[in-house]
Image (tube, coloured by chain):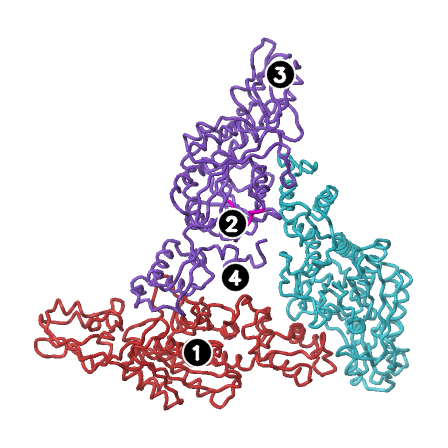
Chain colours: A purple, B cyan, C red
Amino acid sequence: MKDFLSKTADLNRSIISEDFEKTLEIINQRIPLTIFRYPTGSKCFDWVIPKKWIIRDAYIKNDKGERILDWRKNPLHVLIGSLPINKEISREELFKKIYISDKYPDLIPYQFKFYKLDWGFCMAKNQRDKIEGNHFKVFIDSEYVDGDLLVGEHIIKGQSDKCLILMAHIDHPAQVNDGLAGAAVLIKLAEELKGILPSYTLKFHFLSERIGSIAYLYHNYKKIDEIIGGIFCEMPGVHNYPLVLQYSKWKNTRLDRIAEYVLRSSNKEVVFADCFKHVVNDDGFYNSPGIDIPCISLSRSKPLKKNDLYHFPFYHTSGDNLENFDFKQAEEFLSILKRIILILDKDRKIIRKYIGIPCLSRHNLWVDWRIRPEISGNIYTILSKIDNNLSIFDICQNNNIDFEEVYKFIEKLKDSNLIDLESTESIWFSSNNPFSKLSNYIKK
Amino acid sequence: MKDFLSKTADLNRSIISEDFEKTLEIINQRIPLTIFRYPTGSKCFDWVIPKKWIIRDAYIKNDKGERILDWRKNPLHVLIGSLPINKEISREELFKKIYISDKYPDLIPYQFKFYKLDWGFCMAKNQRDKIEGNHFKVFIDSEYVDGDLLVGEHIIKGQSDKCLILMAHIDHPAQVNDGLAGAAVLIKLAEELKGILPSYTLKFHFLSERIGSIAYLYHNYKKIDEIIGGIFCEMPGVHNYPLVLQYSKWKNTRLDRIAEYVLRSSNKEVVFADCFKHVVNDDGFYNSPGIDIPCISLSRSKPLKKNDLYHFPFYHTSGDNLENFDFKQAEEFLSILKRIILILDKDRKIIRKYIGIPCLSRHNLWVDWRIRPEISGNIYTILSKIDNNLSIFDICQNNNIDFEEVYKFIEKLKDSNLIDLESTESIWFSSNNPFSKLSNYIKK
Amino acid sequence: MKDFLSKTADLNRSIISEDFEKTLEIINQRIPLTIFRYPTGSKCFDWVIPKKWIIRDAYIKNDKGERILDWRKNPLHVLIGSLPINKEISREELFKKIYISDKYPDLIPYQFKFYKLDWGFCMAKNQRDKIEGNHFKVFIDSEYVDGDLLVGEHIIKGQSDKCLILMAHIDHPAQVNDGLAGAAVLIKLAEELKGILPSYTLKFHFLSERIGSIAYLYHNYKKIDEIIGGIFCEMPGVHNYPLVLQYSKWKNTRLDRIAEYVLRSSNKEVVFADCFKHVVNDDGFYNSPGIDIPCISLSRSKPLKKNDLYHFPFYHTSGDNLENFDFKQAEEFLSILKRIILILDKDRKIIRKYIGIPCLSRHNLWVDWRIRPEISGNIYTILSKIDNNLSIFDICQNNNIDFEEVYKFIEKLKDSNLIDLESTESIWFSSNNPFSKLSNYIKK
């Protein structure tokens, strides 16, 4: 992750920009990407693709001609999306156009305006307070041109065309945990999964927050039934903070339940949040009415209190940088995410070929309850649940047994020709599934 | 309310009686009534309309010829429904025929007999204990004749013929909170709502407890599907006691939910009771098998304990009078009831005309979450619920947001042509409504 | 019970054996049995009927020729299912073949091997430790021959062919609470019920644990729909221990609910356990996938803790004998079981013949709420539930009213021709039943 983040952390990756495209190229060197292009002005549902923002230089000069703010040092120094300006102004006028962070007086805030356009600068409060003099030159060499919104997609083809979308946004300039680090985790995950043939196709999306997913879903709306779910990933490397699972709006789809199970069995402090109640990124649009794709979100953050918008220290400032990034936390995030994918991948619907309960000792499967009572007790519980619409995971979650233990026992039953195993596709959204509360849900 | 109650409080308003009819005439002077007449002896479901009870005079005289009990002072002095009598009796015989209240020795109890007919008197225990002498004349000039059970109906015609029935019983002689005061509230509510065209037709019923509703429903059974619900009102002006919502038997119809929401958001102490478990008046018959109209009950009372039948002090005595009536409490009762009616009236089913989540900033509807996080958070929650079978109220209740706030936002979406609004009629009893547990309920 | 247990307690009742057949004969002297015979080697679902085990004599002799272990004193002295042996062996070899109980050093453990066959002896640890000498003769005169697995069935014919199966296993040699005492309870129950014509047919099964039920169900699989439920009974006479109800896998069938209600209203300490979680006997197979007959289990035991297999003191030792059997506890167990059967038998579906709520006083059914508030309150609750798919028990359980009280009131309604009563057969597994959560359950 370090290598990728070092190359991309400081880039000026705004929604449609040179650096956004450059970031996709860097990803493409690691895992091959297909790039989708959606032109400025085209409509996607209720939304319209914006223009490309180009910036070449920007500064504030004092009356000695010294650059007291120099955009080349940090892309955050200019309001993201700023209009061009070239003007001499008074101290009073200048201060009105400088955004600062009261909470972090030593850090540059990350500020943006895309709809009510304006020009402006951002700097540390302490730096601003040291500005001397009364006359200044402000210069921003920016422009808006037609361009393409880009979405980068990496695919690991599965046995089924039904796919799971893993997504991270990479469009927050000079921010690390906020977006980019999610991409770093996904790249490494894709590399680690390389060569497997998963049950479901896995699609990795690197995009601009929300509008990227909106454009992608709009142009793939006819094939939307192929998408069985989504996982949005961000802020994996926040120091000291717990993993947060934000559920899909159904809260109990197979994806929600597997993610919940993996987090719970991680023996770490974890937080569970309702859909739309914690952080709303691309998952918000996936879960929205008419789209209706269950999408969970994984991040590291404190549980949000009412009116508290700061998910982690240095959020939306120049402090969200590599120096403050906790790689150990990000690695743990990756391992949790990977376990979710692997359970989802290995899970199978169990087709019973006998009636009742099999004679375990005839198949050398009997476990003496006087010697291993715990295993034996679970075996009865497992056998009682082997009915056609339940999967291995259903049994293990409902009874709080380790997935691997159940999986091994089920494989032995298969070897003894007592059962068959099938894809979970037919029970992905099953109202017959007694573990599901989705009883009223009929997928489109 | 004072005016109406002053004119009617002391009347001898028994089930079928002159004073009952007189009370309807007094109501009719305020709000026009249609009077339904159901003759003595006619059958209504399993019930039969009783005879009219007429009483002209009644007294107990001592051997000096003094009226030691005089019915003309208070209609409660005679057992309501008493047979005529004219006889000289001993002290012992007399005392067997006098009903008293041990709990309130200074008050006359309200006693009645309609089925196993008898004659009798009621007086304060302390008054009875002072009776001297051994020989008495008892005289009751009463008779039973054929008559008509009356139901008074006031209508506020709505856009739909589907109607809500608001009801109060006025048949408890010389009682105020117990029945009559509910009528006082309904009269004022009808006056305050005059001139509006509500979504649903509102029908105000003034009647004799239970038998009035039974007769009305029997004679309107063919049109019973037009009745979407009922609200029974009584005991609004009990001093110091909380509002009690007794649910319909379903407990979660739209009517139950709106009433519950309004009571909860009143920031007053309130009590919630299950159907048939608190006070069973006309609502009992509305909710009964084969009728199956959801009917809630609003009253002021303490939560009933087992075997404790006294809903408020002076219940069923001469102390349930105007002197002990708390008009401020009754006004608050009225305002709560009115809010229930208004939310029910303004609520609309939302028809989404876009897919996903709209681009709020394009429609000038975006609220900056950095400035107004609470509103903004709710907006996402609201947008995520805009699906065809939910109403404005559904969204606000489920997410605990103020109805007016949601209503205003929904109106803006309508102005932006993003949604249409429709009557809630089609989702009044909807098993598709995920907020409802009425899944098995199919209206007739 | 004492008589039956005295005759059978010490018998060597292994799965297929002379003493098993002898035990059935003793039962047959009390209540007539039909004996089903399933021959060795025949397949039943995934299971195969084993051979008959015959044992004639067994001992260990020391070098003085003295029997230091004599099988004739207690059938537990030989590993149940032991292969024959006739051999001189060393002290070291002998000790490897002697099973003891560390927990109860004065008692002989009950040990068995039916699949990985071997020979062996069982004795008290303290007895074993006193063995002197270095050379021994071990002798077991046993053999395996073809035979028949026996199932004894006693029937009390009901109005319906639909039947309830009451079962106890009698195949644990020289054990009392563990199996045999359940049979003692069932015999007495059958005698007490003699002469009644129950609603549902009652079948009493005396069999070998699990394999008996498996064989019976296999050979009656075509008529499996006639079986509406099962009750497995064991360990009724454990001293000091509470009654345990282990639910069927649905947990809320009519049978589960009646049993739960009876136990709760017994005012005794009782324990409720989920299916497959406490003791898994024949009920495990009844509840298993593809069989799907709701079967509860009644026993006396402590609530099992994880890894604690000892349901009661002396479990699986020679201490599970008549001396340690508590007949008072067993009688109480019987009375509870009998009440379950009687409620199940008397319960009826109520067919309402009126609309709304009847006029109780017209039918002399009115109870003055001022005099008997509790009864009266319940009457409204009862009347509100009289709808076509509910039974008397449904009403009484849901509202926590005494079954007999409701039953009497319902009988009065029947006498007044207000309702009809029908068998509960049509609502035994009803998804329309609002008291049931079996909504997805469709019987085969």
Which of pointers 4 and 3 indicates the residue nearer the eye?
Answer: 4
Residue A228 within the magenta-colored segment of the rendering: yes
Badge 2 density bin: few <14, some 14–19, many ≥20, Cα 10 Å: many
Residue C333: mark in rendering: 1
Badge 4 density bin: few <14, some 14–19, many ≥20, Cα 10 Å: some
Which of pointers 1 and 3 indicates the residue nearer the eye?
Answer: 3
Instruction: Locate residue A215 relative to residue C30 in the image: left or right.
Output: right
The percent coordinates of residue C15 (x first, y second) are: 30, 78
Marks 4 and 2 share the same chain? yes
Instruction: Locate residue B249 relative to residue A334 in the image: left or right.
Output: right
Quick one: B146 or A432, which is closer to the camera?
Answer: A432
Residue A432: mark in rendering: 4
Residue A138: mark in rendering: 3
Say whether disc 3 or disc 2 marks the residue closer to the N-terminus.
3
Q: What amino acid is at disc 4?
A: Asn
Quick one: C353 or B84, which is closer to the camera?
Answer: C353
Query: Where does the N terminus of chain C fall, quadrant-wise?
Result: bottom left
C-alpha distance separating marks 1 and 4: 38 Å
C-alpha distance separating marks 2 and 1: 53 Å
Q: Are marks 3 and 2 in contact (CB under 8 Å)?
A: no
C-alpha distance separating marks 1 and 3: 93 Å
C-alpha distance separating marks 4 and 2: 18 Å
- Give the secondary structure at mark 1: helix
The percent coordinates of residue A429 (x first, y second) are: 52, 55
Label 4: chain?
Answer: A
Q: What amino acid is at disc 1?
A: Phe
Say whether disc 4 or disc 2 marks the residue closer to the N-terminus.
2
Image position of B64 with respect to C261: above or below? below
